[in-house]
Amino acid sequence: MWNKVYVEENLIETPRVKSILAKVKREPITLKSYDEIWGQSKKPYLHKRDSLNLFLAEKKGQLLKLAPDAYGQLGEPHYYFIHAYNCIYECQYCYLQGYFNTPDIVLFINHEEIISEMQKTLEENPDSRVWFHAGEFSDSLALTHLTGELELYHAFCRKNPRAIIELRTKSVNIKELILLEPLPNFIISFSLSPQKMGKLIDLKTPSTQSRLKTMDELNKLGFTLAAHFDPIIYQDQFKIQYEELLETMQSLHLTKALSYLSMGVVRFTKDVYREVERNYPDSPLHSTPMVKSFDNKVRYNHPMRMWMMNTVKELALKYGVQEPAIYFCMEEHA
């Protein structure tokens, strides 16, 4: 998978880096700091198809970021933690294609520092649960067979029942996960598109069918699950396709098992939208007009997106998802 592997020189002898290098089987190139090279010159997003480099580094500066309003369910503080930059998958709507100068992957290995910051944040919020989300800048499971950090975050959840960790993913790579004990506050959430739409836009990802099979396996093992129907993309058959998806989920006893189900329509910043138009000119993402909306992002107009999300919400209720578990993500009004 990797063309070149770069390692910050102060990390080269650490056990975690040695373990990753043994698995990737590439001779590392050392450098003082990953950002001497990473992102310093423009590398087009689609170069990831045939030339992807790996950087192993320490995350400096802000280790946790306060999530924006409507990122998760209301009423409790939400943060996301940054364990990596960029993703091995190629979803056509991915905002990372207009966010960084490069698609090359950075894996941050100072997980103990991240967890220490999480512990501090939890103590600063003594009267409520605190949510910590992984998967904002990279899939949270796809490379865990290399990185081996899940056990550390799991131990943090076991020690702190008020802390909730959500692993957002499209991966079926659960080899490391199933070695852990299921916990109510250690949530694995899968982003799902209807099968036909997923084939068109969720490039290089495991199929929707594969993800549902993995969710079924985890559910039977007792893991806490959630799902994201995000982004919902308009096309003539979208209602039929979401009904098929929810019917399959119900047949696997997943709809009633969901801790929550978030819904959101496709949305872009202006810069990302330009990149999407350039990278995927024939994508179904461009089939319906979009407008600048309340947060300066490009979306369908408000009546249309409310109609779309409420349509899918009604289907979810029909197939057994509990109403309090459903929320609209990154939206002006629910």
Image (tube, rainbow, N blue to C red):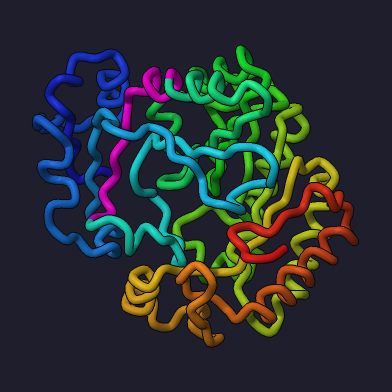
At x 60%, y 34%, the residue is 131
| In the image: residue 95, left or right of residue 307 | left
Quarter occupied by residue 77: top right
* Foreground of the two, 94 or 254: 94
36 lies above or below 58: below
Q: Position of residue 300 (x, y in %)?
A: 58, 79
Is residue 251 visible from the viewing direction of this image?
no
Quarter of the image that includes the C terminus:
bottom right
* Foreground of the two, 213 or 229: 229
Is residue 125 visible from the viewing direction of this image?
yes
| In the image: residue 180, left or right of residue 115 | right
Quarter occupied by residue 64: top left
Please give the range of residues in magenta: 102-116
At x 29%, y 44%, the residue is 105
120 lies above or below 255: above
| In the image: residue 132, left or right of residue 53 | right
Q: Position of residue 118 (x, y in %)?
A: 48, 24
At x 19%, y 14%, the residue is 13
Q: Position of residue 227 (x, y in %)?
A: 68, 49
At x 63%, y 47%, the residue is 72
* Foreground of the two, 71 or 101: 71
Magenta segment includes 48: no
